[in-house]
């Protein structure tokens, strides 16, 4: 009788322990991906890493002091996002010494090949990042801009030295962004 009751208990305990072990490994992996609640490690399509830091007044890209940083929060399937890509590329080229444009897709588990297709098809000649930190960064920017949890895209947020300069929601003309860049540069 004792053998019959002990065997199911041993099997149940071993199943529970093996399940707990897998969960711990998943939690450790997730913890390693998160730097801190104020830092976001992004990975470009060429595997270059970009550290974004959240400050009191906005966001900054590490080692890019005095440069204007534009975060383009987008999705590859979004028509206004697609149309805006060539404008952001044009601005990146015009202001290459003073501007860094980073495209942050909100799509999770997106293969890099999709982003490469987006770059080619819509002339997105600026940094495109694809990492697990994309969505948390996009959400943090949207929260700072008071756009809500289910914010519209595209969102273009412009910062200099960690301070918000201007943001745009939806499709925007290149001239408006260029005007704000010139003001930020003192031109």
Image: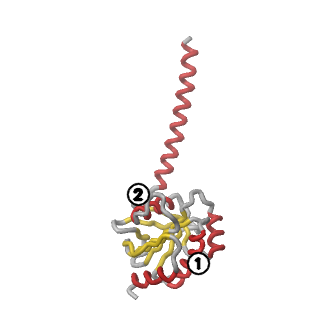
Q: Choose between 136 and 144: the one closer to the eye.
A: 144
Alpha-carbon distance for marks 2 and 1?
Answer: 33 Å
Q: Choose between 56 and 179: the one closer to the eye.
A: 179
> Quarter-wise, where is residue 40 in the image?
bottom left
Q: Give the x, y percent position of residue 71.
A: 48, 70
> Quarter-wise, where is residue 79 in the image?
bottom right
Quarter of the image with the C terminus is bottom left
Q: On residue 36, which mark appears?
A: 2
Please indicate whether residue 142 sits to the left or right of residue 77 in the image: left
Q: Residues within 10 Å of mark 1 (few under 14, many from 20)?
A: some
Q: Which residue lies furthest to the left in this view?
A: 56
Above or below 111: residue 121: below
Above or below 9: residue 74: below
User: Which circle's residue, 2 or 1, is located before the other in the chain?
Assistant: 2
Q: Give the x, y percent position of residue 65.
A: 40, 76
Q: Name the residue under label 1.
A: 86
Please indicate whether residue 1 sits to the left or right of residue 144 in the image: right
Q: Residues within 10 Å of mark 2 (few under 14, many from 20)?
A: few
Please indicate whether residue 34 sits to the left or right of residue 22 in the image: left
| Residue visible at 66% across and 73% down in the picture | 121
| Residue visible at 43% across and 81% down in the picture | 180
Q: Which residue lies furthest to the top in this view?
A: 1
Tell me the element at label 1: helix
Tell me the element at label 2: loop
């Amino acid at each position: 009788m004792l053998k019959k009751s002990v065997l199911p208990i041993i099997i149940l305990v071993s199943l529970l322990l093996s399940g707990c072990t897998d969960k711990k490994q998943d939690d450790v992996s997730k913890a390693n991906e998160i730097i801190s609640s104020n830092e976001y490690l992004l990975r470009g399509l060429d595997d270059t890493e970009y550290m974004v830091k959240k400050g009191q007044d906005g966001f900054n890209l590490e080692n890019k002091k005095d440069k204007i940083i534009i975060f383009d929060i987008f999705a590859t399937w979004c028509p206004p996002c697609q149309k805006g890509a060539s404008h952001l590329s044009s601005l990146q080229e015009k202001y290459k010494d003073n501007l860094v444009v980073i495209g942050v897709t909100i799509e999770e588990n997106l293969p890099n090949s999709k982003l490469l297709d987006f770059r080619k098809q819509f002339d997105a000649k600026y940094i495109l990042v694809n990492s697990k930190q994309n969505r948390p960064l996009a959400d943090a920017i949207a929260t700072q801009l008071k756009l809500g949890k289910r914010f519209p895209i595209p969102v273009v947020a412009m910062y200099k030295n960690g301070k918000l300069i201007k943001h745009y929601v939806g499709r925007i003309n290149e001239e408006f962004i260029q005007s704000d860049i010139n003001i930020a540069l003192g031109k």
